[in-house]
Image (cartoon, rainbow, N blue to C red):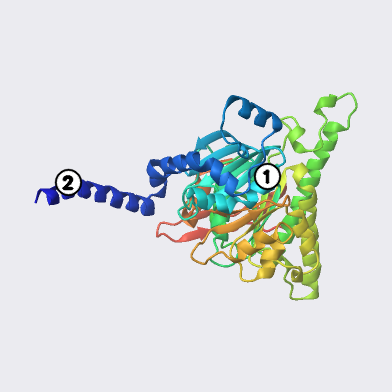
Amino acid sequence: MSELLTLAQVGGPLAAVTGGAMVARAKTPALYWSAIGLPVTAVRFSATYGSTMDACGLTVEPSRLRVLVTRALTRREIRPVPPKVRRVRPTSTGLRIQLRLAPGQEPADVAASAERLRHAWGVHAMHVSIVKPGVVELRMTGFDVLRKVRMPRGLPTDDLLVPVAVRDDGTAFVRDYRVIPHCLTLGTTLSGKSVFMRNLIAGLARRKVALVGIDCKLGVEQAPFAPRLSALATDSQQASALLDKLVEEMEARYDLIRDHQGIPGMVLDEEITSDVWGLPVELRPVPLVLIVDEVAELFLVASRKDEERRDHMVTQLIRLAQLGRAAGMFLEVCGQRFGSELGKGATMLRAQLTGRVVHRVNDKPTAEMGLGDISPEAVLAATQIAPEMPGMAVAGDSSGGWSRIRTPNLSLADTARICRETAHLAPVLPGLAAFRPVAVHASADGARLLKPHPLAD
């Protein structure tokens, strides 16, 4: 009887702790990682680092000086040398370790062994990034951060830095318009493409930028954001006229830059600039982001007259993509399907869109159109996105780098509320005044009334 009582006293709490840990691992993986996973992984890493690196072929023969010193001072066995651990930093989602590569090694050697290192140390994922020549960083993720998305803390607040999603290494995916001015976003119905754009619009709405929309689905996607938009086109005819005005706005900004730099003796040499960012603050025009929803609608034609308008629109869109960055004008082009069969100018437009975000698509050619010039592995990853993971996407750029990302769920109502609360930040652009969205008012009986608005010529 006493043995059963002792077993109950010891086994009961142990079973409760074990059960609690299992529940925490399933329900709150971040808490489980901080309390249990991180200490266990840190101990495992410290105890097995040398042997694991040796087993993965990431060691080199020691230098002659090291051999002589070791033999002179100790009688230890001379073993191969692994990369030197420079820094170990725990995070809320994993562990980051900086390694100084041994002579003769390159980052590709470590990247090729990432999967074996992941299994050896029992973490969910392992990513390798280059810090500087000779130094790499191992980014261990203790759990699937894309299963339940939580944006990390300490996000940037600059007007042209917009956190949109979470990468699979636990860091934030940030749209940096100064580095990657234009982006192509693809995804089929219910893939999470609209949620991605809502997060982007919500982030931009809080910043001092002008938002311009082209939504050829009669405005059903972007009309709820009307209070924050400086201009909106809801069909191909309006889109053509709006693109003309945007090109005029871009040319006016170039005239402003040229006037500032082209007067000898009036402008100091160090103040001469080739883009709007070098202009004095009082002269600098507000950044403008054009969001095109369902870009294929701009390419579709039903008659020869439509072909002329289509060619004109595509030409203007390409001009904005080629020249807009220096004028502080950026493009976000979205669509379900994008391919060369859309017509003349499709591949030329794609070539100007440096950033690529591909959600789940219905066909491999669309993934190849978005990511084929970045990496074959990125195309494969995009075609493997499961339907039950909406918001999951593969993001890359022309440098060849890519990663899996997922956006946090943001409803249409919440995005519309953010746009109403930030309506005072919407700049008035005189050249686009005719395209300013109509105001939506609620009547006493709850019906929504639209005030008529003049249409551009």
Depth check: give the residue in front, 277 or 146.
Answer: 146
Q: From the top left corner, tell me how far across and down residue 239 is, in percent.
A: 70, 60
- Taking 204 as reference, is 135 above or below it? above
Report helix, strand or loop for mark 2: helix
Characterize the local packing of mark 2: few (<14), some (14-19) or many (20 or more) Cα atoms within 10 angstroms: few
Which residue ends up furthest to the left in the rendered image? Answer: 1
Characterize the local packing of mark 1: few (<14), some (14-19) or many (20 or more) Cα atoms within 10 angstroms: some
Is 405 positioned to the left or the right of 257 in the image? left
- Taking 90 as reference, is 240 above or below it? below
Report helix, strand or loop for mark 1: helix
In the rendering, which numbered label is found on residue 107?
A: 1
Q: Quadrant of the C terminus?
A: bottom right
Amino acid identity at mark 2: Gln
Amino acid identity at mark 1: Pro
> In terms of image quadrants, where is residue 60?
top right
Whole-angstrom CA distance, mark 1 to mark 2, is: 52 Å
Depth check: give the residue in front, 118 or 413.
Answer: 118
Q: From the top left corner, tell me how far across and down residue 185 is, in percent.
A: 64, 58
Identity of the residue drawn at 44% across and 61% down? 447
Residue under numbered circle 2: 9
In the rendering, which numbered label is found on residue 234?
A: none
Depth check: give the residue in front, 16 or 227.
Answer: 16
**Residue 163 visible, this angle:** no
> Tags 1 and 2 in contact by the CB under 8 Å rule?
no
- Taking 8 as reference, is 311 above or below it? below
**Residue 351 visible, this angle:** yes
